[in-house]
Amino acid sequence: MNQLFNIELAEKYFPKILSALPTTLMIVFVATIIGLVLGALIAMIRIEKVPVLSQLSAVFVSFIRGTPILVQLFIVFYGLPEMLKMIGLDIRDLDKMYYLYVTYGLNTAAFQSETIRAAILSVPQNQLEASLASGLTKQQAYLKVILPQAIKVAVPSFGTATISLLQDTSLAFTIGVLDVIGRAQALGAVTMHIFEGYVDAAIIFIFCSIVLELLFKWIEKKTNYDLVASRRRVSLFNRKRKSKVDQVHSSQKASQTIVTKKTLSEEVL
């Protein structure tokens, strides 16, 4: 009877499975970029209530949030080539990675658009009105006043969504892409020891999730403008206090010098 878990096989699998990590990270990176850009655009369309586009954006977000990502992946991978074939475009030979970029990018955009929209709406409306009244254009008001405050609200949700995206990439193997999970499954199918490969994959995902969590905590601290401003005020106060103390010490030394000179002059006389 075979062992349930063979530590030697797990050690042997690990470098091979780890070699597929760049594929997984590339999916996360490209999907995050697409999701942030498209998500910000969708959020602004819905906030400004652009006719027609606002309604289409709401339907898109509702569809993406209401269907499993596996269904979305199959629609893009199997359905998109057939739809484009009707208008004379043949993309059947396209690299499978591009289907993943499209699927995960659209999925991320739908979720991030709601995060961005909620973050922007959390900023009091009177700040936008005051910015416009002071002579700023609407674009300048969003870039210089609204977005810096909205980012502070949105960063924790961005971190959660990115970690979730990392875990969702485990479905890439379903269309034949050898990512971390795909490589683990392939090795398991050859050796008939599947459990070891999945344990290795779990370790890799846990490590990457912890790194992402720490990264977003660092970003959250950097974008916490209230904390930064408070530290600057404390630093400025300490410098002023030190300057005053130095002035007092200098004046005391000067007075001591004058007293010493008077004493010496009196002794000479």
Image (spheres, grey):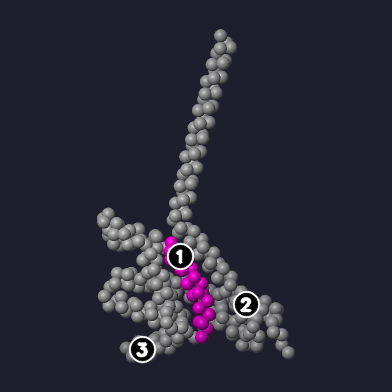
Residue at (32, 72) in percent of width and height: 46
Of tags 2 and 1, which is closer to the observer?
Answer: 1
Quarter occupied by residue 60: bottom left
Residue 168 visible here: yes
Q: CA distance from mark 2 to mark 1?
A: 30 Å
Q: Is residue 105 magenta?
A: no
Question: In the image as oriented, which residue stretches furthest toward the top?
Answer: 269
The answer to whether marks 2 and 3 mark residues whose Cβ atoms lie closer than 8 Å is no
Residue 122 position within the rendered picture, expressed as x and y whole percent measured from the top left: 38, 64
Look at mark 2 in the image and give the residue it sits on.
200
The label on residue 83 is 3
Q: Amino acid at mark 1?
A: Val
The residues colored magenta run 152-174
Residue at (56, 81) in percent of width and height: 181
Q: Earlier in the sequence, mark 2 or mark 3?
A: 3
| Secondary element type, mark 1 | helix
Residue at (39, 82) in percent of width and height: 63
Q: Is residue 156 magenta?
A: yes
Look at mark 1 in the image and give the residue it sits on.
155
Q: Earlier in the sequence, mark 2 or mark 1?
A: 1
Residue closer to the observer: 99 or 159: 159
Quarter occupied by residue 131: bottom left
Q: Residues within 10 Å of mark 3 (few under 14, many from 20)?
A: few
| Secondary element type, mark 3 | helix
